[in-house]
Every structure is written in C-alpha cells, then in structure tokens.
Amino acid sequence: MQPSQRYGLIMAGGRGTRFWPRSRQTRAKQVLPLAGERSLIQQTVDRLRPLLPPERLFIVTNHHLRDQIVTQLPEVPPAQIIAEPAPRNTAPCIGLAAHLLQQIAPGASLGVFPADHWIEQPDAFLPIVDAAFSAAERGELVVLGIQPRWPETGYGYVEFHAGIEPGALSTRPVVQFREKPDLATAQTYLASGRFFWNSGMFFWTAQTILAALRQHLPQTLTLLASLPPLHDPGFPAALELAFPKCENISIDYAVLEKAANVTGIATSDFGWNDLGSWNAVYEIASKDDRGNAAKGDVLLLNASGNYVEGAGKLIALAGVDGLVVVDTPDALLVTTRERAQEVGRLVKALEEARRFDLL
Amino acid sequence: MQPSQRYGLIMAGGRGTRFWPRSRQTRAKQVLPLAGERSLIQQTVDRLRPLLPPERLFIVTNHHLRDQIVTQLPEVPPAQIIAEPAPRNTAPCIGLAAHLLQQIAPGASLGVFPADHWIEQPDAFLPIVDAAFSAAERGELVVLGIQPRWPETGYGYVEFHAGIEPGALSTRPVVQFREKPDLATAQTYLASGRFFWNSGMFFWTAQTILAALRQHLPQTLTLLASLPPLHDPGFPAALELAFPKCENISIDYAVLEKAANVTGIATSDFGWNDLGSWNAVYEIASKDDRGNAAKGDVLLLNASGNYVEGAGKLIALAGVDGLVVVDTPDALLVTTRERAQEVGRLVKALEEARRFDLL
C-alpha cells in the first residue's frame, strides 16, 4: 500500500472545562493557543503535515466549534470538517470517519489523533507515526503507548508483555488496557516497565476498524454504514438523524479491550503531554528563575512557581507560591497548580447557578 | 471652658499604598469605602458629630485628594479643608491647625484624629473623647492609648506606670513613647499591662501645643506663626511658601517624647483598628462560614479565609486559603493575608518601573 493512501482523523469534539475561564463552549481548549502562537488544533495539523497533507485529514468536532476550526484551518477542505450532531465519545466518531474514508479510498489507512495534545519533539514523533501506519497496513489495530515518566493517575494505561525496549518502532501485542489507576497501582505500573500511557492515538485501515466495529458494536456500525457519501447533498440531514442514535462509548471500551489483533508501539518519550490542566500548561511553559510562567502584564514580588495569564490589565502577585491566576475580560480564576485538575468543578457550579454567559 | 470651644483636626494626608490597587495617589485609603458604604473620612466625621459639628473641623490633606474630600464632606466648610503644599509628617500639620484655630477661637481645644481608622464601637469611643478634651482644657497634652489585644509590631506604644485600670476615663502621666517593637518586645509589652497602643489621637488646647512647639520645634513654629488668617486672600500663597520649609517630623518625636505635661487615657478596647492592610479590612469584614470575606461577583469552591474584592467580573477561587484578591479595572492584586503588609512594596516597584498610570 502506498503512503498516499494514508489519512488522518483529528478528534476535536471536547470542551476542555479545566481551562476555564479561557475555555468556553465556543472557545474550547483545542482552538486556543495554550502553548505557542497557534492553537492546539493548528499545531496538530502542522505537526502531521510531513506525513499527512491537510487535504487528507478529517476533523470531527461539534457545532460550537466547527466555524472556528474552518477559519483556523483554511488548508483543510471544509467538507471534511464535520460537526457531530451530539457528543457520542470516540467509537462513533472513529466509525464515521472510517466509513467516509472507505467510500472515497477503499483500503486506505487512518491515523487517529486527539486535537488538543502537546508534542515537544515532532521529529521523534513522526517516525513512530510512520511505523504505526505500516503496522496498520498489515491489518493490526495499533495504539501508541508512551513510556511513563511518573505514576500519573489521570491517564489510561496499555500493558505489554515483559521485555520491552522503549523506542523500538515495531509493534507488539497488547496484553490489556487499564483505566485510570489509583496512585499505588500507578506506582506498580511505573515500576513494572510493562505499562505505557494510552496516548489516544490509533492506527488501522478503514476496513480493519469497520470490521471490528461490525463485530463489537453492530448497531452503531449499521447506523453509520447507512450514511451517504460526504459530498452527497443528503449527508448532513442523514448524519443529523443517525448519529445521535449511536452508542455513547469509547473506542477503547467498545473495541480495543475485546479485539484480538490489537498491538501497540511502546514509544520512548517524545515530549507528549495531554495538557490536562493549567498545571500541564505550566509544565511546558518557559519560566523565570523563580519558576514563574507569566503571560501578559505581570509584576511578581517574592513569588515563585506561579502560572499567570493576563488579559490586558496589570496582574501583581506578592508573596504567593504555586498559584494559577488566569484573567479574562469577564472572569478571573485563582487556584493552585496542585488543584488545577478541579477547575472543571467550577464550570459545573456555574452551570448549576445558570451563569450561561460564563460557560 | 465651654464644649463649644472644642474643635477637631482630621489628618488626611496619607497615601495608603498598602491598599493598592484600590488606593491610588488620587484615591487614597481615607477617601475609599474600605469598610461600609461611606468612605473612612466620612465615617470619621460621622462618628465625631455628636461632639464636634462639621463646621468646627479642620481637615488637612494633600492636593491629590482635596477636591474629593470637599465633595465627600459637603457639611465641612471648604476653606477648612486645606491641602498641604508638601508632606511634612504630623508636627507641621498639627502646628498649622493650632495656629489657625488660635486666630479664630483663642484658647479653644483641639482633638487630632487620623482620617483613616476604624472604630467598631463609637458609643464607647465618644465618652473617652469627651474626657480627653476635658483633660486638654486643663493644660495637658493628652494621647489616647488603646489596650492592646495582641503583640502588634506595626504600632507604636505608650508606656504608663504600673497599676492601670483600662477603661478609667482619667488621664495619667505617660512614662515614655516607644516606636514599633520587634515581636519579642511586643510580647513583653503585652504581658506587662503597662503598654498601650499609640492611637495617633491627641488632645490639647491650641495654646498648649503651640507653646510646646515653640519650645521644641521653634523654626517650624515661627514659619507657621507668620501665616495670615485662613480667610485672608493671601493665605494660600503664604502657606505655599512657608509650609515646605517646615521640618518633616512627627508630633510624637518633635514634642510628645520631650514635653513634661504629656498624659494619656488608658482606654479599654472600643474596636479600634488602624486598617493598616487588607488583612485588617478582612478582620472587620463579615464572613461566610468558611471565613471568606467577599465583595462583588465571587464564586468560592473549597476556599477558606480569603479576602476578595471584585470590580464587576466574576472572580472564582478554587482550593485556596488565606489569599487576598483585589480586582480593579486596570490592576489586579493577588497576595496572602499574612503578607498583606508588603503591598506597599509593589507600589514602590511600580514607581521604579515608571508605571505612573497605576500609582
């Protein structure tokens, strides 16, 4: 199979409430320039370009974000930027892209990439993607596992058999997938050398994943298989009708934990970060000699280890450590780096208080 | 001497940099409503009204604030609201008021009150003021000492002889004045029962204090004694010329530490607070059941013991304790209650950075 038959699916449907107040329903994490000048989804497209030109990308997002993504990515054909009528987790999203791909390029392979991750070393990343596509083209369902750097409790894990050499570009069988562990479990995972972070990046041919969905998620597959081709005038209405009836389930749970031909690449670290909270953005930001990462007009006095983002006005921090301070024109967040994971709960509280202007 | 011969001087010249970013050169602490609906200087005038009607008040402030004070206090004759041409600490300010008073009401008594203090129980305060005026009318230089509630290192102290009954309304000789002590010294002061906080409130007749200034600060007194009466058309120009030549010195240091006829009233606590920092404002504010004091549109999640002041937009605090967060249209402060004393250093840093728009 030729490299020209490789396509990408960028999953851009999330909301990213942990980046409130910067992120809102109409300005989700993936369309924000959280690290660098370009938005995370723009960086995702840029990074893949040497292997996947933009005209071979599908982007699946939601109605709140589609127009912005079309604007941010003029190089991607707008018809291939699709808004899900309802959020249904990753399995229907991937099934939809595989179905559409199979109609235009039967037998092509598909790499699946979250829109909102950070990769420090794209040069180390691309050969891995290339190797994963090659394995996919041999009929494997391939997941990228990332060598863990700490006992993270916020990620899922992929277990391999013993004897791994991280960094080898060959695939190996996956023993099992594990959901987010508690800290003690995560520590045993880290010590074992056999558990790798589940990156959420997957590779398969359209044919292989459609066959797996037909076996493990037949109802959803039937709904998706009934859709007309992307450029058919009836496509949007048919999608609107069929998609909400699909099961709300992740590809991991629906297929990968069950299928026999699941393999993974146990990569060494290429600076992957899922940017799960303001603290993750702090980790990759440049810092002053007291460990403060500050954007905007910021004055620091006896302050260390803080993440500060301004919105125009001066922000002065005095005698505080480890805080996250994010100012926007209509809302200000003050929390700690340690508690930054809990920012989503503020968004829930705002929903309960019916503060729709701030969501 | 009749009570009608009692006058008040409200000293309103300070800048209050520790209340940045609310306080600025043109919006100093005393003209802000830091506690309650009315500004601190308005509350000072209100509190004294049962003893001192507004037409018998002198207010000495600076050019940045005079117009605002005239607006805030329409009941005080504008001519009696005087802007110092230059800051010269308390001795010249008091000498000026005594000189002007002596010209319009020879032999009258003068109570001196900082414009920016908080008094929780004005009903307990007024009888003390009345007693202090009576002692002043007998020729004493009277200071109000406040029974200390903790070993404060930010106040000066007044030492009395042993055997004090706090709350007695009679004056007693002052042994000596003490500058701000270190913590160990402040603790011995508190334990001794003989040391009281120097409130900065003083009572004397114009004649007594002018005589003391003539003895202890003759050059300054000569400059002030040369000034024409307040309503003389030449007064402003003469003041502009003479005042900057006065010595820059406090009344405590210039007179009270040296004069023989200094007495004090050792008061029991009447809820006096010099509002020296945002933490002091926190202390007197009403709080929720987790000890947060919040003004404005504030959302708190797992937060306790914080002081928050909004300027319109929502402020969300999550998982933080003991912070001070003060938002204004052009500057935002984040510090801790414990470090709130150091906010003045931020203002210095802004001066050094020539951020005049924010001073």
Image: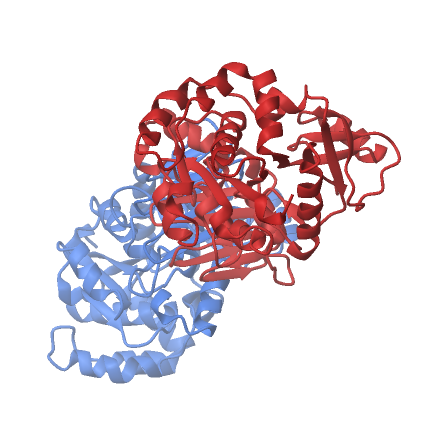
Chain colours: A red, B blue
Instruction: Residue at 48%, 56% (x, y): give it.
Output: A38
**Lateral position of residue A273 relative to residue B305, left or right:** right
Count of marks placed on residues: 0
Question: Looking at the figure, which quarter contains the C terminus of chain A?
Answer: top left
The answer to whether residue B52 is seen in the rendering is yes
Instruction: Residue at 14%, 56% (x, y): give it.
Output: B55
Instruction: Residue at 37%, 67% (x, y): give it.
Output: B90
Instruction: Residue at 70%, 51% (x, y): give it.
Output: A127
Question: Looking at the figure, which quarter contains the N terminus of chain A?
Answer: top right
Q: Where is residue B66 in the image (x, y as percent from the top left)?
A: 22, 65
The part of the image, by quadrant, that contains residue B91 is: bottom left
Residue in front for this viewpoint, B78 or B199:
B78
Report the residue that reaches farthest toward the right: A163
Above or below B110: residue A95: above
**Lateral position of residue B60 relative to residue A262, left or right:** left
Above or below B147: residue A256: above
Residue in front for this viewpoint, B31 or B140:
B31
